[in-house]
């Protein structure tokens, strides 16, 4: 199943195959958006990584703000296979996290979801993902890695942070009033130079943990994530969703 319309209108597989500029990329691109066809211009690929267990409106609003403010061509949501930071935690199956991400992004023409990390064995490291993406995309495609305010300052401590600095611009989605001092200090003191843009987005104090807690307590997810995601959670009985058909009598 395709991620979205963002495979690039007018760039059919046949056209790509004839274009030596993207010919190699076509073979390994899988469900990644097609970008880079016109060598005379630069393209901006937004990459939203995360566990997405489940995806919620905070992720979607942050990605949309990055798309608007940085003039991105497309944002690809990439659920982590086995997330580096959640080795000690119970994480839902990659297949479910990918399915929910695909559902949540499917009505936005400039969002797409990719199996790129889910299909990979082993722990997911951002530096490795960016390196593999760099091999796939031509040089006129720039990467914008989007993270939330809670994660941005940590990037300098991630494995192969220098590779991340070299391969991607960083976009930190912050809430109004969020103290950026520690993030700014971390980047100023880092041994490599990062290109960071901070974006203020509407206050969305939403997290996947909060959604999981609400589901297990039988509470509604309305307005916290697209209804189609809520439906999937109940249909597949994720996060302790039990019995009761979705939407029947319990205000879900
Ligand atoms: P958990 O509660 O399980 O930690 P989470 O809500 O933080 O989940 P992740 O999948 O860990 O979701 O987050 C993926 C990315 O989205 C991270 O960069 C994170 O900082 C960012 N993010 C998460 N929630 C928000 C939000 N409400 N607003 C902006 N960015 C967010
Ligand atoms: Mg988190």
Image (cartoon, rainbow, N blue to C red):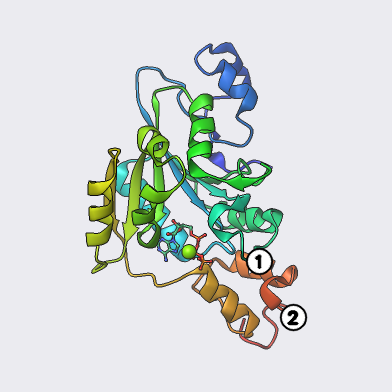
Q: Quadrant of residue 239?
A: bottom right
Q: Which residue carries the number 2 mark? A: 242
Name the disc covering residue 82, or none: none
- Determine the residue located farthest toward the right in the rendered image: 243
The location of residue 27, given as percent across then percent down, is 64, 22
Q: Does the image show residue 148?
A: yes
Q: Secondary structure at mark 1?
A: loop
Which residue is at a point 33% across and 70% down the rendered structure image?
203
**Which label sits in the foreground, 1 or 2?**
1
Against 39, residue 111 (above or below) is below
Q: Earlier in the sequence, mark 1 or mark 2?
A: 1
| In the displayed structure image, the side of residue 187 where residue 101 appears, left or right | right
Regarding residue 8, the answer to whether it shows in the image is: no
**Does residue 240 sit above or below 62 in this rendering?**
below
List x then y, in percent, for residue 135.
52, 25
Q: Nearer the viewer, residue 53 or 154?
A: 154
* Nearest the eye: 77 or 83: 83
Of the pair 251 and 78, the residue shown nearer to us? 78
24 lies above or below 133 = above
How far apart are the two marked residues, 1 and 2, measured between alpha carbons?
Answer: 18 Å
Q: Which residue is mark 1?
A: 90
Q: Position of residue 43 (x, y in %)?
A: 39, 30
Quadrant showing the N terminus: top right
Secondary structure of the residue carrying tag 2 is: loop
Residue 62 % position (x, y): 39, 57
Q: Nearer the viewer, residue 62 or 177?
A: 177
Q: Residue at x 59, y 63 (%)?
A: 53
Snapshot quadrant of residue 13:
top right
Residue at 56% over, 53% down: 84
């Amino acid at each position: 199943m395709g991620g979205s319309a963002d495979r690039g209108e007018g760039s059919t597989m046949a056209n790509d195959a004839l274009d030596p500029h993207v010919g190699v990329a076509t073979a390994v691109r899988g469900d990644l958006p097609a970008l880079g066809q016109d060598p005379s211009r630069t393209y901006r690929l937004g990459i939203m990584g995360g566990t997405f267990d489940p995806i919620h409106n905070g992720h979607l609003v942050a990605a949309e703000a990055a798309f608007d403010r940085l003039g991105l061509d497309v944002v690809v949501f990439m659920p982590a296979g086995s997330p580096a930071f959640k080795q000690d935690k119970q994480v839902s199956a990659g297949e479910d996290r990918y399915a929910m991400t695909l559902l949540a992004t499917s009505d936005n023409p400039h969002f797409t979801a990719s199996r790129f990390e889910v299909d990979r064995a082993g722990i997911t490291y951002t530096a490795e993902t960016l390196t593999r993406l760099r091999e796939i995309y031509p040089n006129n495609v720039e990467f914008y890695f989007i993270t939330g305010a809670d994660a941005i300052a940590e990037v300098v401590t991630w494995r192969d942070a220098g590779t991340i600095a070299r391969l991607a611009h960083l976009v930190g989605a912050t809430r109004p009033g969020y103290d950026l001092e520690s993030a700014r200090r971390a980047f100023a003191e880092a041994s490599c130079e990062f290109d960071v843009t901070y974006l203020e987005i509407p206050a969305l104090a939403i997290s996947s943990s909060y959604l999981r807690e609400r589901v297990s307590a039988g509470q509604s997810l309305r307005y916290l994530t697209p209804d189609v995601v809520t439906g999937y959670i109940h249909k597949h009985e994720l996060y302790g969703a039990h019995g009761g058909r979705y939407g029947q009598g319990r205000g879900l």
